[in-house]
Image (tube, rainbow, N blue to C red):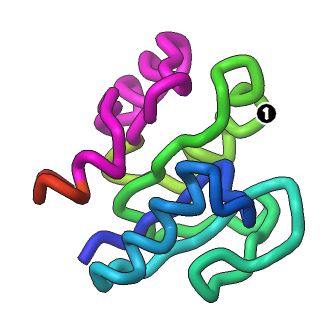
Amino acid sequence: MKKTLILGASTNPARYSYLVANKLVRKGHEIVNVGRKVGKVAGVDIETASDIHTDIDTITLYVGPKNQQPYYDYILQTKPKRVIFNPGAENEELKVLLEKDGIEPIEACTLVMLNTGQY
């Protein structure tokens, strides 16, 4: 199982990050929710990007490119194996930083990856 950090976690059931959190938990993956608002998603508290997690396999991004820059250091310090840029989160600048740090950037939809067994 891949421990996954959801950056842009939301308690709004209409948000893809909410759907992904629940799908990951149902499939047995451990998650870390990181977002701006307090709450719980899939039974897991949403935290701020202050505690660095060092055991993350995947970060899945639900933050648009213009709002990602404040998270660059956090993402790089977390040192995930890969970062998934969901539709609308694609960011060439961050992709280059990740590659320089040996982190695999993937432009894909986490929900589709989970539904098709590619996760």
Residue appearing at x 33%, y 27% in the figure: 107
Residue appearing at x 62%, y 50% in the figure: 15
Above or below, comparing residue 17 to residue 63 in the picture: below
Q: Position of residue 6 (x, y in %)?
A: 55, 58
Above or below, comparing residue 22 to residue 108 in the picture: below
Q: Position of residue 54 (x, y in %)?
A: 51, 68
Q: Position of residue 84 (x, y in %)?
A: 39, 40
From the viewer's perspective, is 72 left or right of 66?
Answer: left
Q: Quadrant of residue 83?
A: top left
Q: Quadrant of residue 33?
A: bottom right
The magenta region covers: 84-113
**Within 10 angstroms of label 1, few (less than 14), some, or many (20 or more) residues?**
few
How many callouts does the rendering have? 1
Above or below, comparing residue 2 to residue 48 in the picture: below
| Nearer-the-camera pick, 57 or 99 | 57
From the viewer's perspective, is 71 left or right of 54?
Answer: right
Above or below, comparing residue 50 to residue 28 in the picture: above
| Nearer-the-camera pick, 73 or 66 | 66
Residue on which the image places disc 1: 70
